[in-house]
Amino acid sequence: MAVLEPSVVTMKDGRTATVRTPVEVDAEALLATMHAIFADGAGMAATPDEAPKLTVDEERAWIRARREGPDEVVLVADVEGQLAGNLMLTVPARRRLAHVATLAITLTPPFRSLGLGDALMTRALTWAAGHPRIEKVDLRVLSDNDGAIRLYRRHGFVEEGRLARAIRYEDGRYVDDVLMGRWL
C-alpha cells in the first residue's frame, strides 16, 4: 500500500484526529474497529456474525503485505490513540480494469458525522489523482445509508447504477445497492 504522511484534522467537536497509514502495531485496534462496525451493522451488506474471523497475527500480516504494493492505500482515522475508522482504495490487478480503483470506508458509530469521513476521502482521492493509472474511483453503498451518500456526493461521486432490492434485511425490508463513481 502507499504509505502517506500523516495529517492532523480538527473534527466538528473540536478534537483532533490523525489520518495516517496503519502500521503493524495497529493490528489489534484495527480488528476491534472492524468488529465494532460489524456489530453496529448500519450500512453493511453483511450481518454482525459474518465479520471476518482474523487473528492479530493475520491482521499484522495483512498490514505488512499491503505496505509493499503501490496499488492500494489504506488509511485510518486515529482519535487520541483510538482508531475511529478506516478507508481502503484498491486498484485491480487486471490491466483492463486498472484505471478504476474501488473505495470502501467505514467509521465506528461514535465518530460518524464529525468530519472524519471527509478527511479520509480527501486524502484518498488526492492520492488517487496522483496515481499513474487511476482515472476513476467507484464504490457501492446501500440506498438507506443517507449519511454516506451525502458524503460521497460532496466528494463528486454520482450514481451510475442501482441493483434493485439487492439487500434483504432480517425484518424483510429490501434496499438497493447503489453504484457510484467519480472521474478524476
Image (cartoon, rainbow, N blue to C red):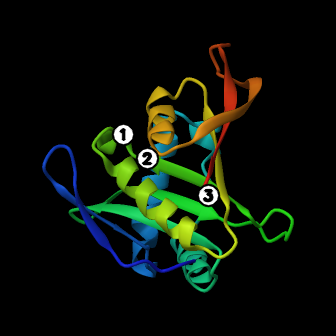
Q: For the residues carrying marks 2 and 3, which lies nearer the camera in this image? A: 2
Name the image quarter holding the N terminus: bottom right
Tags 1 and 2 touching, CB below 8 Å:
yes
**Residue at 60% across, 78% down:** 66
Q: For the residues carrying marks 1 and 2, which lies nearer the camera in this image? A: 1
N-term mark: 1 or 2 = 2
Residue situated furthest front in the rendering: 184
Name the image quarter holding the C terminus: bottom right
Q: Left or right: where does residue 52 sit relative to residue 111?
A: right
Instruction: Return the residue at label 3.
Output: 53
What's under tag 2, amino acid-wise? Ala
Q: Left or right: where does residue 47 sit relative to residue 120?
A: right
SS for tag 1?
A: helix
Where is residue 97? Give x, y as percent: 81, 62
Residue situated furthest top in the rendering: 172
What's under tag 1, amino acid-wise? Pro
What's under tag 3, amino acid-wise? Lys
N-term mark: 2 or 3 = 2
Q: Gap between marks 1 and 2, in whole Å?
A: 8 Å
Q: Is residue 48 above or below residue 11?
A: above
Where is residue 59? Give x, y as percent: 55, 71
The front one of 54 and 133 is 133
**Residue at 50% across, 58% down:** 87
SS for tag 3?
A: loop
Q: Gap between marks 2 and 3, in whole Å?
A: 13 Å
The label shown at residue 109 is 1
The label shown at residue 36 is 2
